[in-house]
Image (cartoon, helix red, strand yellow):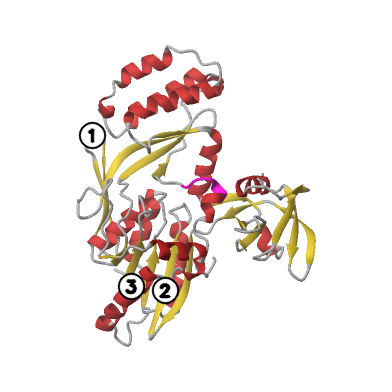
Amino acid sequence: MNHSPKQFPWLRDLIFTGTLTATATLSFLLPLGSRGVFAALQDSPKNLVDEVWQIVNREYVDHDFNQVDWQATRQELLSKDYTSQEQAYEAIKKALEPLGDPYTRFLDPEKFQQLTSQTSGELSGIGIRLELHEESKALRVVEPIENSPAFEAGVKAGDGILAIDGASTIGMSLEEASEKIRGDVGTPVTLKLSRQGKGSFDLTLNRAQIELPSVHYTLRDEGKMRVGYISLDEFSSHAAEQMQQAIQKLNNEKVDAYVLDLRGNPGGLLHASIEIARMWLDDGAIVSTVDRVGGKQEYVANHRALTNLPLAILVDGNSASASEILTGALKDNKRATVVGAQTFGKAVVQSVHSLSDGSGLAVTISRYYPPSGLDINHKGITPDIKLELSNTQRRLLMTQPELRGTPDDPQYKQAITVLETNVLTRKTPNQVGEPVSRR
């Protein structure tokens, strides 16, 4: 686990060429039937089209399909002949458009693989974060991921990457470089690196399955107060266990309060947001979901919070979906003070299906509501303390990301002011850093 705060929160977007903006429940379903049926579906673009139609017909949250005659849509789709998968893909995308739901969407095999890698929180590669230097356009290492092949081999932050398997990186985009470095587990890749004081040298690494850190944390001394600062990039399948480790280790450091940074977090897996909410909230409602027929499912805290210390949450206009579930749960239960800008406003849940040819389909299956019962879709959550960053402040934090979560970060600074008041009103000698008692 990386103990330092993440300094380049947008780099994952560049590496994956797109972020997951849906709160999803992964449901990798194969068509029913024999291996022969599977092969037929795989070889038939028309069957792929109908496969998508059937899933939407069965699961889509709006049983009126946005006033679309969905049966007529099927007839139109099946009346056409498709000479290629690409034609079928275009027909599927066109058929989904009238639903008016940007989150119900078709994903070609490449984009589906990117999404599943992101939600799984794992990637086959060597474990480095990359950037293109703004001025020189040179490719270099931001940091190696702990316990990865690159980390174990001694790759360092700031190392330049001159070539990948003999191909020069001059003029290579970040996406192209990432694609060349990724590959099957166990296969080798050779990098030509440059390092100050050492010059250039070749390094061959074997690719491995790597758990990507979604949680980054550090201890900050703010005056007389010890603050556990935790940033959460996304709600991947490993996010909950990583969050648990972060809270437990910071508890051991006897912190007085916490700041949870959800700025720029686009969402992720529903169950991850619920499990993380339970780490902060000992009692109370977390979220409820309502499906197409009005079926309601409620999720509540389970008396297993890891801490009851004062908490501030940082949010912005890119805090969406699962971030809003967590924020809403802690805000409505008065467990945390929310600081920052209005959140994105995405209050729907998707199920993500693997299709027979390796492509995928995300389909909206339910709407969710925070404990208050308010509909935050297209509206977002209003912070307790609304503090917008100016364009100058936003640019400063983007060009100098190491300033995030420091007194040079206005939203973080405001959170510290709030926490100082909370700590002073509740602190006793035996309370510092103690987790809540179990029930």
Residue at image mark 1: 293
Reply yes or no: does residue 236 show up in magenta.
Answer: no
The label nearer to you, 1 versus 2, is 2
Residue 322 rendering spot, x and y as whole percentages: 36, 52
Q: Residue at x 62, y 59 (%)?
A: 135
Residue 93 picture quarter: top left
Q: Which residues, given as a range, are shown in magenta?
A: 15-19
Q: Secondary structure at mark 3?
A: helix
Q: Earlier in the sequence, mark 1 or mark 3?
A: 1
Most foreground residue, 298 or 146: 146
Name the residue type under label 3.
Gln
Residue 420's place in the image compared with 96, above or below, is below
Q: Residues under labels 1 and 2: Cα distance?
A: 43 Å
Q: Residue at x 43, y 21 (%)?
A: 50
The label nearer to you, 3 versus 2, is 3
Residue at image mark 3: 414
Give left or right: position of 68 versus 129: left
Name the residue type under label 2.
Gly
Local crowd size for mark 1, using a 10 Å CA cut-off: few (<14), some (14–19), many (≥20): few
Residue 295 rendering spot, x and y as whole percentages: 23, 39
